[in-house]
Amino acid sequence: MQLQCPVLLEGNTIPEKYTCDGENISPPLRWQNAPNGTRTYALIVEDPDAPGKVFTHWVLYDMPVERQQLSEAIASQPQDKAMMKQGKNDFGNLGYGGPCPPAGAHRYVFRLYALDQMLELQPGAAKVDLLNLMQGHILETAEVTGIYERKGS
C-alpha cells in the first residue's frame, strides 16, 4: 500500500498553508494498492519530536474502503455523509490541527492503516481508543513524513 501527499515529497518541508502559520487546513492525500480484505481505513498524524510526548494532530477512522483520497481542507466535523469519523487531536479539537512546533524542525508522520473491519467507534474519540480498537485488525500501514520549522524558531 502506498500513501502520497501531492503537495509534499517524502522528507521535505510541509507547505506553510497546511500549518498554524498559514491556513491550518489539512493537505490532500491519496493512497492505492490496499491489501485484500481491507474494509476500512484510519489515519493518524503525529509529531514524534514534540516535547514530552508524541503529539497527535489528526485522527480519522471508519473511512470507507471505496475512498482512495482525502481532498484538501477536510472540514472539522464529527462525521461526514460517507460515515468517515474524526477524533480529537492533542490541541483538544476535533479534526486536523496543523504543524505548529514550539522550536526547531519537527517531523510530521501521516500514517494510514488498512483495517479488516469497521471499528464502530463514536466520533470524537481519542487516538488511544482508536489504537486499542485497531489491535488485531491492521492489515497494512503506509506513511509519508514531512518537516516543518516555524520562522524565527
Image (spheres, grey):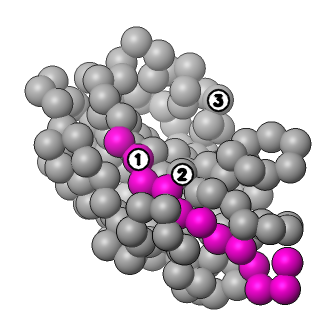
Q: Is residue 132 above or below residue 69?
A: above
Q: Residue at x 55, y 27 (%)?
A: 131
Residue 143 image label: 1
Disc 2 crowd, CA 10 A, few/some/many (<14, 14-19, 20+): many
Where is mark 2, residue-wise? 109
Q: For the N terminus, which image quadrant? A: top left
Give the spatial CA distance, label 2 vs label 3: 17 Å
Q: Tell me where residue 122 appears, x and y as whole percent.
A: 52, 36
Q: Which residues are magenta?
A: 142-153
Q: Is residue 95 above or below residue 16?
A: above
Q: Nearer the viewer, mark 2 or mark 3?
A: 2
Q: Amino acid at mark 2?
A: Val
Q: Are marks 2 and 1 in contact (CB under 8 Å)?
A: yes
Residue 140 in the magenta stretch? The answer is: no
Q: Amino acid at mark 1?
A: Glu
Please tell me which of labels 1 and 3 falls first in the chain. Answer: 3
Where is mark 3, residue-wise? 128
Q: Tell me where residue 44 appears, x and y as whole percent.
A: 52, 45
Q: Residue at x 49, y 62 (%)?
A: 11
Describe the element under mark 3 as helix, strand or loop: helix
Describe the element under mark 2 as helix, strand or loop: strand
- Quarter holding residue 18: bottom right
Disc 1 crowd, CA 10 A, few/some/many (<14, 14-19, 20+): some
Q: Tell me where residue 70 appears, x and y as whole percent.
A: 32, 63
Please tell me which of labels 2 and 1 falls first in the chain. Answer: 2
Q: Amino acid at mark 3?
A: Val
Describe the element under mark 1 as helix, strand or loop: strand
